[in-house]
Image (cartoon, grey):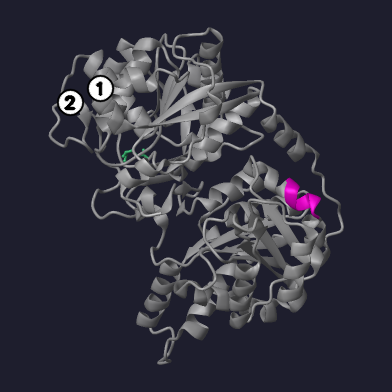
Amino acid sequence: MTQYVFVTGGVVSSLGKGIVVASIGRMLKNRGASIAVMKLDPYLNVDPGTMSPYQHGEVYVTGDGSETDLDLGHYERFIDVELTAVSNVTAGQIYSDVISRERNGRYLGGTIQTVPHVTNLIKERIHQLADESGADVAVIEVGGTVGDIEGLPFLEAIRQMRNDVGRDNATYVHLTLLPYLGSTGELKTKPTQHSVQALRGIGIQPDAIICRSDHEVDLGLREKISLYCDVPTEAVIGLETLDTVYAVPLSLEEQGFGDFLADRLGITRSADLSAWSDMVEKLRDPKRTVRIAIVGKYVELPDSYLSVIEALRHAALAGDCEVVIDWIKAEDIEEQGPDHVLSRASGIVVPGGFGERGVEGMITTARYARERGIPYLGLCLGMQVMVIEWARSVLGLEDANSAEFDPGSEDPVIAYLPGQRELGATGGTMRLGLYPCKLTSGTIAANAYGTELVNERHRHRYELNNDYRERFNESGLISSGTAPDGSLVEISEVKDHPFMVGSQFHPEFASRPDRPHPLFREFVSAAVDTLREGAQHTMPLDESENGNVSPSAEMIERSGIST
Ligand code: GLN
């Protein structure tokens, strides 16, 4: 029978609950347990597919084509599981299901209420996850923070689960923040006490409390939290901000949290941490640094490109180096030109995106990378701008564009191909999920994969227009991957360039810490070669801006996001 671990959050949001859930999954998998994992999102959207990256960060696409919360990316990367739609439940899905059941007369004249109708549906989805996966342990994350109005039905549902599945089969973990008061130099436990009180008010007594903090959580503090919150001291865990998210499972293990959980869940096998610790050790000891520019629309919020960042890190790890990211707003290239802003990058990534803003800057970026032989990786939109640039500069089609940005373009080299999904309402109209791609032997892409056929995850509407395909291939923009029947171009690459490859799919979703995606791996390796040759666009690393920068106050202001 499946055991359940429920993870809730308190005090503030953005504490890294997804990473903790992913880490719990990893720790239990290291003990031989099979893991199912789920995110319950209390917002009313049916899925995050229609949300702006500014609202929600990256939309993570699973193999079955579901548009899901970015935490599912953490789960897949940490636990190395393939997830599906079953693993992301939103309030929007639950309510629309309840209402359509009501309209279909399924409730036989009853009054439909949050308890039990909404909560029953939530529990149905949790049971579905357990039944379909047959996993030993299901780790369930409740999004948001205790006290959120829309989270209440979800908390109520997981409260009821304890009774439904038996006390010993449900474990509750609460993640909180210990704020640091600079004036007195101490960590404060009061917000955690209040948060646990709020949780108890709903009827949930946590079995373990994980305290995020920027300082060491000493025994005295843990004893105090234990006393006030009724949790054994060994189940009060400190989680300091670490240099890499991949160290979280190790930090939790060091404090005995893995053993505590295993004990509660009746798992007797001890954990094999060796591969994971080796990976973290290697991550912490890079032999060199490679600077990669990400030129996109949403760079003020790097969470919009979470999987791209992680895929770059995995690829860098395989090459014993650390990746330092220059976040470049595509519009800045339109205003300032590429020379100054891109001068330091040894490689350039143009990631996915929708809408016209910044696209001309991306096209200029593709031209800069092509003309200077700088390694370039185009991800979906990044491939499309690479194609447009080629059409304009090499084929001389000055008006070339994507039908998405200029429906009246004389040369729509990226177009909505007939016979594909109908354009219309937003939501659910994209080509989503896994589709096969046949590689053209002898190309950079085929050599990177080392195989003939791959399956990759998609999320787009537009495609390379087949009317131009022959001219592209003849002029040196090679179709290095196509749909197996040849109907669609999946990968394009520039001939006689160190690495200029664009994919219509999103390889970043398939990268794992121990299995970098072949295209990312070869891209970073080409960037490192550029670095080795000491080309003019590489520069020594300035300690003060050691990569992965958080958005500056100015960037945030410009984007109009409130913090
Ligand atoms: N906007 C483009 C399309 O719909 C690219 C999408 C993407 O980059 N994911 O085809």
Q: Position of residue 531 (x, y in %)?
A: 53, 13
**Outermost residue, front direction?**
183
Res 134 seen here: no
Q: Position of residue 417 (x, y in %)?
A: 26, 37
Of 139 and 172, the residue lying toward us:
172
CB within 8 Å, label 2 to label 1: yes
Query: Relative to residue 176, is residue 364 depicted above or below?
Result: above
Q: Is residue 104 left or right of residue 152?
A: left
Q: Which residue is mark 2?
A: 411
Q: Which residues are magenta?
A: 250-255
Distance (Cα) linking label 2 and label 1: 9 Å
Q: Which residue is mark 1?
A: 468
Amino acid residing under circle 1: Tyr
Please name the residue shown 25% across and 55% down the image.
425
Crowding at dot 2, Cα within 10 Å, few <14 / some 14-19 / many 20+, comes out as many
Q: Is residue 120 left or right of residue 253?
A: left
Amino acid residing under circle 2: Asp
Is the CB of the residue bearing disc 2 within 8 angstroms of ligand 1?
A: no
Q: Earlier in the sequence, mark 2 or mark 1?
A: 2
